[in-house]
Image (cartoon, rainbow, N blue to C red):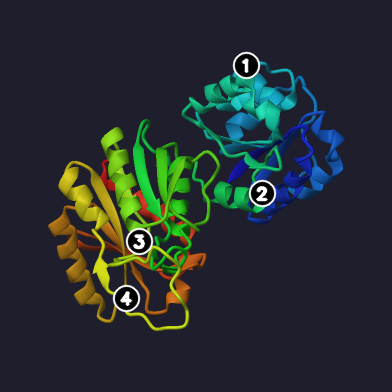
């Protein structure tokens, strides 16, 4: 992939060195443009070293390099992007190498990914927010971050940015206006005021699916079990504790907004404790817990919103693959689902809480595809590809 990489004058510019280097190591061609202000934090020499290229574009030149680079590169990244740079791009001011190149590149329709970094007051300024919203409204521009910490709007960490950029395909775009609701993470069932039962789900799978959809341009929202990993800052999420709360929030969202697709990637508890103690249980005696089944989220959606497309994740110990595929095929038909993503949890630690997994995707006709143990970000890409294809996009 040919990547046009722009660096602007933020103290976070030093983070760009590692990201450029890692992108180059991943066999991408990285072409670097830097503003004069950026060179106060990093030198042209170190940018040349990181990219492996002799030429770094740091001045407005007569040879129309911005046109050449815009036509040649597949994707543009601005990391970090200052408030000044973002505002200039939003208003068509092309007076630095970065803003000139970004405005030129945006006109090609190819993806431009912007990673903001600035002080919190600037980020919250109504003037800046208007400019940011202008860019967000453009179909081929994605704003990633910032991360709010210590009253600073910090740039997304290089490792996270690297995964997003490498996992992003310039050729894969969600249709404009696609609305998707995703569930992720574990839920809890309380025993008493402070103790609860749960499972080891990290929420990574659902969060990565939401991020994949967001990076493709979909309008996505998460319903997230407490204790899960957090999504990109620009992805809205609702945090819940119990299966009942997750079900309630999903139905509430579907009543409020016309979602095209619901992806149930969470690992909600299947049982709740029949009688929850209103005080802390004493630890000097034994107790018997009676568990009762929780309502199924997919069943409630199918019953109350029959027109919504639903993808359901299933975790099971798969002993007989062909028998399981038959069972899941019937499950998809019976519940009118788009498809099922099945995890084999014979070895739980390989699935729960890990960065990789292996799945089978099964629809009403049987097995669609099967993966080996691969990174969950790759599984997210496969799931989204198949979902969009089935929806006719």
Quarter of the rendering containing residue 332: bottom left
Instruction: Name the residue beneath numbered marker 1.
Output: 92
Circle 4/circle 3 CB separation < 8 Å: no
Question: Where residue 364 appears, x then y in whole percent?
Answer: 17, 58
Alpha carbons under labels 3 and 1: distance apart? 47 Å
Which-is-in-front pick, marks 4 and 1?
4
Element at badge 2? loop
Q: Is residue 283 above or below residue 239?
A: below
Element at badge 3? loop
Q: Which of marks 4 and 1 is nearer the N terminus?
A: 1
Pick whichever, 160 or 299, lies toward us: 299
Q: Is residue 305 left or right of residue 393?
A: left
Alpha carbons under labels 4 and 1: distance apart? 65 Å
Which residue is painted at 42% across and 79% down in the image?
A: 347
Question: Where residue 372 appears, x then y in whole percent?
Answer: 42, 70
Q: Which of marks 1 and 2 is nearer the N terminus?
A: 1
Which-is-in-front pick, marks 4 and 3?
4
Count neighbours of disc 1 (C-alpha within 10 A) and say few if under 14, some if 14 to 19, many if 20 or more. Answer: few
Which residue is painted at 77% across and 49% down in the image?
A: 50
Count neighbours of disc 4 (C-alpha within 10 A) and say few if under 14, some if 14 to 19, many if 20 or more. Answer: few
Which residue is painted at 59% across and 27% down in the image?
A: 105
Quarter holding the C terminus? top left
Pick whichever, 122 or 41, lies toward us: 122
Instruction: Name the residue beneath numbered marker 2.
Output: 157
Instruction: Name the residue beneath numbered marker 4.
Output: 289
Which-is-in-front pick, marks 2 and 3?
3
Q: Earlier in the sequence, mark 2 or mark 3?
A: 2
Which-is-in-front pick, marks 1 and 2?
2
Count neighbours of disc 2 (C-alpha within 10 A) and say few if under 14, some if 14 to 19, many if 20 or more. Answer: some
Instruction: Name the residue beneath numbered marker 3.
Output: 268
Element at badge 1? loop
């Amino acid at each position: 992939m040919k990547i046009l990489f722009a660096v602007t004058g933020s103290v976070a510019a030093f983070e760009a060195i590692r990201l450029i280097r890692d992108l180059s190591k991943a066999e991408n061609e990285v072409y670097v443009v830097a503003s004069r202000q950026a060179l106060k934090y990093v030198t042209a020499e170190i940018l040349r070293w990181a990219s492996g290229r002799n030429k770094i574009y740091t001045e407005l030149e007569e040879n129309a390099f911005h046109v050449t680079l815009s036509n040649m590169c597949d994707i543009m990244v601005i990391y970090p992007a200052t408030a000044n740079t973002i505002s200039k791009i939003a208003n068509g001011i092309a007076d630095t190498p970065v803003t000139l190149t970004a405005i030129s590149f945006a006109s090609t329709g190819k993806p431009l990914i912007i990673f903001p970094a600035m002080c919190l007051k600037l980020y919250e300024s109504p003037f800046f927010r208007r400019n940011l919203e202008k860019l967000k409204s453009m179909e081929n521009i994605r704003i990633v971050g910032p991360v709010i910490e210590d009253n600073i709007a910090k740039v997304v960490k290089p490792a996270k940015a690297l995964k997003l950029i490498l996992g992003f395909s310039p050729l894969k775009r969600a249709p404009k206006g696609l609305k998707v609701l995703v569930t992720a993470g574990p839920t809890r069932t309380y025993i008493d005021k402070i103790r609860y039962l749960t499972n080891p789900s990290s929420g990574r799978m659902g969060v990565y699916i939401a991020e994949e959809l967001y990076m493709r341009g979909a309008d996505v929202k998460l319903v997230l079990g407490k204790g899960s990993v957090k999504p990109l800052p620009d992805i809205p999420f609702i945090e819940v504790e119990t299966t009942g709360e997750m079900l309630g929030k999903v139905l509430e969202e579907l009543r409020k907004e016309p979602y095209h697709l619901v992806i149930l990637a969470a690992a909600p508890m299947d049982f709740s404790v029949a009688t929850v103690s209103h005080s802390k249980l004493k630890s000097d005696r034994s107790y018997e817990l009676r568990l009762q089944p929780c309502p199924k989220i997919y069943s409630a959606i199918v019953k109350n919103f029959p027109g919504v497309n639903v993808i359901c994740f299933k975790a099971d110990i798969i002993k007989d693959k062909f028998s399981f595929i038959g069972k899941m095929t019937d499950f998809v038909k019976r519940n009118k689902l788009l498809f099922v993503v099945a995890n084999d949890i014979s070895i739980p630690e390989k699935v729960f809480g890990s960065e990789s997994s292996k799945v089978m995707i099964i629809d009403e006709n049987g097995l669609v595809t099967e993966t080996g143990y691969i990174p969950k970000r790759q599984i997210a890409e496969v799931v989204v590809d198949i979902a969009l294809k089935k929806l006719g996009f």
